[in-house]
Amino acid sequence: MKYHKRKGHDITVVFDGWKTGGAQENHSVIGGIKVIYSRLGEKADSVIRRIISSDRRGWVVVTSDRDIAARAWAADAVPISSEDFTKAIERIYDRTSVEYEDNDEEYIQTDRKGSPRKPSKKEKAIKRVLSKL
């Protein structure tokens, strides 16, 4: 909730009601954060897919699930790994550090066209989103 107050982003969190959920999807707002519990027999992944497919508004999807990330890209949303999101949050609340150090990952050769030094469109989108978090 501190993050929501500080940044003012619209945040939706989806929880799995697959085994213990109610007959219908449950929506509530807690501290300005929209919370959704999927209904009994429905996984949170299905709810996330439905939300980003139906409401195309530039979502940033925090997930470590490859299928959800692929769906996000297809729906013009930008998926961010849970690890990268956690690092971005820690950067915001790290009181000891004045400036964020960008720890570039070790270069890994990929089979793609173009300059190897130039980031892909997806890498640029992720970096742009992370800078706004």
Image: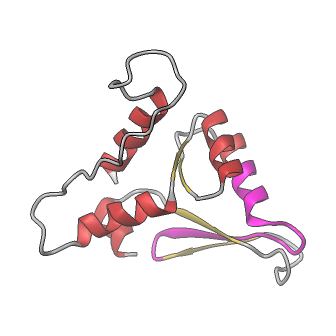
Write the residue at 33% across / 60% down.
88
Query: Is 47 one of the magenta-colored residues?
Result: yes
Is 18 situated left or right of 84 in this image? Answer: right
Answer with the quarter of the image where residue 38 lies. Answer: bottom right
x and y percentages locating residue 109 in the rendered image: 46, 33
Outermost residue on the left side: it is 98
Outermost residue on the top side: it is 114
Answer with the quarter of the image where residue 124 lies. Answer: top left
Outermost residue on the bottom side: it is 20
Measured along the vertical axis of the image, is residue 5 above or below residue 68? Answer: below
Q: How many marks?
A: 0
Toward the viewer: 58 or 119? Answer: 119
Is 60 situated left or right of 133 in this image? Answer: right
Write the residue at 43% across / 42% down.
126
Quadrant location of the C terminus in the rendered image: bottom left
Write the residue at 47% across / 57% down.
10
Toward the viewer: 57 or 44? Answer: 44
x and y percentages locating residue 26 in the rendered image: 74, 73
x and y percentages locating residue 52 in the rendered image: 66, 46
Measured along the vertical axis of the image, is residue 61 above or below residue 12? Answer: above
Is 98 situated left or right of 3 in this image? Answer: left
Toward the viewer: 73 or 115? Answer: 115
Measured along the vertical axis of the image, is residue 69 above or below residue 118? Answer: below
Is 25 situated left or right of 57 in this image? Answer: right
Which contiguous range is marked in magenta?
31-50
Query: Is 130 one of the magenta-colored residues?
Result: no
Write the residue at 34% across / 75% down.
2
